[in-house]
Amino acid sequence: MNADLNTTYVTLGGHVEIHRYRYLYFVIMLTAYILLICFNVSIICLIVIHKNLHEPMYIFIAALLLNSILFSSNIHPKLLVDFLSEKQIVSYQACLFQVFMFYFLSSSEFLLLSARAYDRYVSICKPLQYPAIMRTTTVSLLLCFAWLVPACYIVVPVALNINSKLCSFTLKGIFCNNSLNKLFCVTSNELSIYGVIVLLNLRLFPMLFILFTYTKIIIIAFQSCGDIRRKAVQTCLPHLLVLINYSVLITYDVVIVKLESDFPKTARFVMTLQIITYNPLCNPIIYGLKMKEISNYLKRLLRHMK
C-alpha cells in the first residue's frame, strides 16, 4: 500500500529470471507484437478498401481481427514495460481493468465466431434466403451483441471487487486474470456461481452453437455437388482453425488457475507467452492464406510492393 497516494499495488510474480533475460524477452515480444499489429491491420485495411469484400463474411473477419488487436494491446504493452522495469507491479485498479478487458475481449471472440458461423450456415444451407436474412441491419445487430453482452456480463464481478480487501499482493502470473481472486481475503460464493454462469453463456454455449452449425454445414455439403463442398471447405476451414486456437487459450486460462500451485513456474511462463501471442498472430495468417479473395488481394499487394 502506498500511503501517500492511497494506492494498492499488486506484484506480478510469474516472471522467470527476468533480470538475466529481460532484453531477450523484450525483443521477442516486441517483434511479435509489431508483426501481429501489421498482419491484422493489413487484412482489415484490405477489407475496408475493397468494396467487393464488404460482405457479412468479411465484415465478421475484420471484427475478429480488430478484437485480436485490442486483446493483444491489453497485455503486450504492459508486458513490455515490465520486462524493462526493476519491479513488475501494477496498481489494483489497473489490474481490475486488465481483467475486465481480457475476459470481455476473449468472450467477444467466441460470440463473433458464433456470428460468423451463423453467416456461413445461412449462406450454404439457405442460399436463397441469404440476402434477406443477412442484411446490413442484421450484421450490425450481431456485432453490437457480440461486444455489448460480454461487457455487461464481465463488468459485474469487476465492479463488485473494486473495494474487496486483499490479503496477498503477489499474483502468480505475468498479467491479471482470474488468479486475482486468490488474493482476496474473502471469496464470494455468489460471484463463483456467477462466474460459472458467465462461462456457460459466453464460452460453452457459443462453442456448442458453432459445432452445431458446422455439423449442419458438413451434412448439407456432402449431400450436395462438388462446388458447394468446395465452398464449404474454403470458408469454414479457417473458421474452425481459429476456433481451435481460441479454445486452447480459454482452456489454458481455466486450467492454469485451478492448477496454479502444481504447475512449474517456468513452464507456466513460457506457455503463457506462447498462448497470448500465438492466437492473435496466427489468425490473420490463417485468413490471409485460406480465404481465396483475401489471399488474391494480398498477392496483388505484394507484387505491387515489389
Image (cartoon, rainbow, N blue to C red):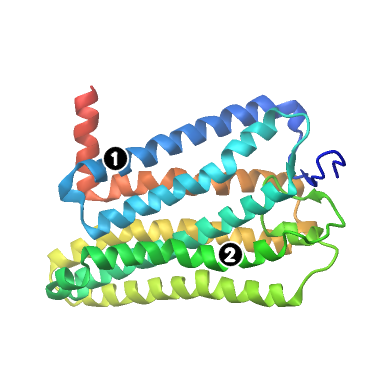
Q: Earlier in the sequence, mark 1 or mark 2?
A: 1
Q: Report the side of 43 relative to 200 (left or right).
A: left
Question: In the rendered image of this protein, does residue 176 appear above or below residue 31?
Answer: below
Q: Report the side of 25 relative to 57 (left or right).
A: right
Q: Quadrant of the N terminus?
A: top right
Could you say which is closer to the camera, residue 57 or residue 256? 57
Residue 286's spot in the image, x, y percent? 36, 48
Q: Residues within 10 Å of mark 2 (few under 14, many from 20)?
A: many
> Can residue 221 be seen at all in this image of the molecule?
no
At a point 19% along the width and 26% down the height, the residue shown is 304
Q: Quadrant of the C terminus?
A: top left
Residue 122's spot in the image, x, y percent? 23, 72
Q: Secondary structure at mark 1?
A: helix
Spatial CA distance of label 1 from label 2 is 30 Å
Residue type at numbered disc 1: Cys
Label 2: which residue? 154
Could you say which is closer to the camera, residue 39 or residue 269? 39
Q: Secondary structure at mark 2?
A: helix
Residue sticking out furthest to the top: 306
Residue 14's spot in the image, x, y percent? 74, 45
For residue 284, the mark is none
Label 1: which residue? 45
Residue 18's spot in the image, x, y percent? 74, 32
Question: In the rendered image of this protein, does residue 27 appear above or below residue 252?
Answer: above
Q: Nearer the viewer, mark 1 or mark 2?
A: 2
Q: Report the side of 209 relative to 102 (left or right).
A: left
Label total for image: 2
Residue type at numbered disc 2: Ile
At a point 15% along the width and 49% down the height, the residue shown is 52
At a point 62% along the width and 67% down the height, the residue shown is 156
Q: Do the CB atoms of the residues marked 1 and 2 lie less than 8 Å apart?
A: no
